[in-house]
Amino acid sequence: MKDIWKKPEIFCKGKTLGQSLDFEFIHKNQCKRAILLFHGMTGSPFEMKKMGRALFEADFDVFCYCLPGHGTSPVNIKTVRWQDWYNDSVDHYKALAEKYKEVYMGGLCMGGVLALTIAAEHKEVKGIVSLSTTLYLDGWTIPWYNFFMPLGLHTILRYYYSFPEREPYGLKNEVLRKKIAALQKRNTEALDNYPMSCIYELLKLSKFARKNMSKVTAPVLLMHAKQDDLTSTKGSKFVYNNIKSKIKKYIELEDSYHLVVMDNQRDYVFKTSIDFLNSLSDYAPEAEHVKESAGV
């Protein structure tokens, strides 16, 4: 598949893995810190790529992979369980933890839920950026889900029905919205619907995450749009109020919808995320500069 961004090897000396949507942005020098990014429900690493580039340029090695059932035929997502997403994500995290001094995680939508759930078990996680954390499907475009879903979620109907994604596609920016709508018609970068079976598994993952949220002790940055069309700020507020992290920060965005990594405030999201992660790191460029100035 032709990549619509600049080739990774040009702007980051990294690589895209084969013809898949996965990406790894790796510095030639031995970087001591890495961040593992997770995309959202029915999305793909495509939506995290600009954030990945910004993190790479801030001196992180960056990794992002398609979650099971994503990035291929829409049929495949109906065969996975939330445990498949979780176990695959844990495997990637463990692989990085063996190679790097510091490992961070970041995620959008369901990806944020996965990052927090992993951190509940793996206390050595250095820090988390969770964006548009989707613990509930209660955004302003889907109030009718609450009526229809109980009728089919717990029956075989969930394997046969999908809710079509519609305007505004998670984007307040109208120019980007048109581009995403066109990409979804190609059915490569993301699915153009929410299979009920996928929603069912997301809600089970979210329930598991809420149950274990008090086990999270890693520093956490939460950013959530006030006008999120898929999930209200209720989920992020739940996280903030229930984690046991000594360092935690919650920011509401005024000019974005659900896809905050692509929408009007994406540059602010990237900068704020980088500043937060650097404040935790022993290997941040600023920290190195301070050490050199002090003669350390």
Image (cartoon, rainbow, N blue to C red):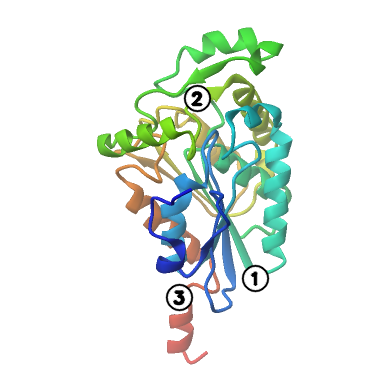
Q: Secondary structure at mark 3?
A: helix
Residue under numbered circle 2 = 193
Mark 2 or mark 1: whose residue is earlier in sequence: 1
Residue under numbered circle 1 = 101
In the image: residue 28, left or right of residue 167: right
Q: Amino acid at mark 1?
A: Lys
Residue at the spot x=30%, y=39% of the render?
176
In the image: residue 267, left or right of residue 31: left
Residue under numbered circle 3 = 285
The local crowd at label 1, few if under 14, some if 14 to 19, many if 20 or more residues have their Cα within 10 Å, is: some
Q: Secondary structure at mark 1?
A: loop
Q: Amino acid at mark 3?
A: Pro
Q: Secondary structure at mark 2?
A: strand
For the residues labelled 3 and 2, the Cα–Cα distance comes to: 42 Å
Question: In this picture, is 181 found above or below 197?
Answer: below
Task: Tell me where residue 182 appears, x and y as whole percent.
Answer: 36, 33
Which of the two residues, 13 or 145, is positioned nearer the viewer here? 13
For the residues labelled 3 and 1, the Cα–Cα distance comes to: 15 Å
For the residues labelled 2 and 1, the Cα–Cα distance comes to: 39 Å
Residue at the spot x=48%, y=48% of the render?
1
Quarter of the image for residue 17 reads: bottom right
Question: In this picture, is 101 found above or below 234?
Answer: below
Task: Tell me where residue 167 appears, x and y as whole percent.
Answer: 35, 24
Eye-nearest disc, 2 or 1: 2
In the drawing, what numbered circle is on residue 286?
none
Which of the two residues, 131 or 11, is positioned nearer the viewer here? 11
Mark 3 or mark 1: whose residue is earlier in sequence: 1
Question: In this picture, is 283 found above or below 251?
Answer: below
Which of the two residues, 168 or 276, is positioned nearer the viewer here? 168
Task: Tell me where residue 189 appears, x and y as whole percent.
Answer: 48, 40
The local crowd at label 3, few if under 14, some if 14 to 19, many if 20 or more residues have their Cα within 10 Å, is: few
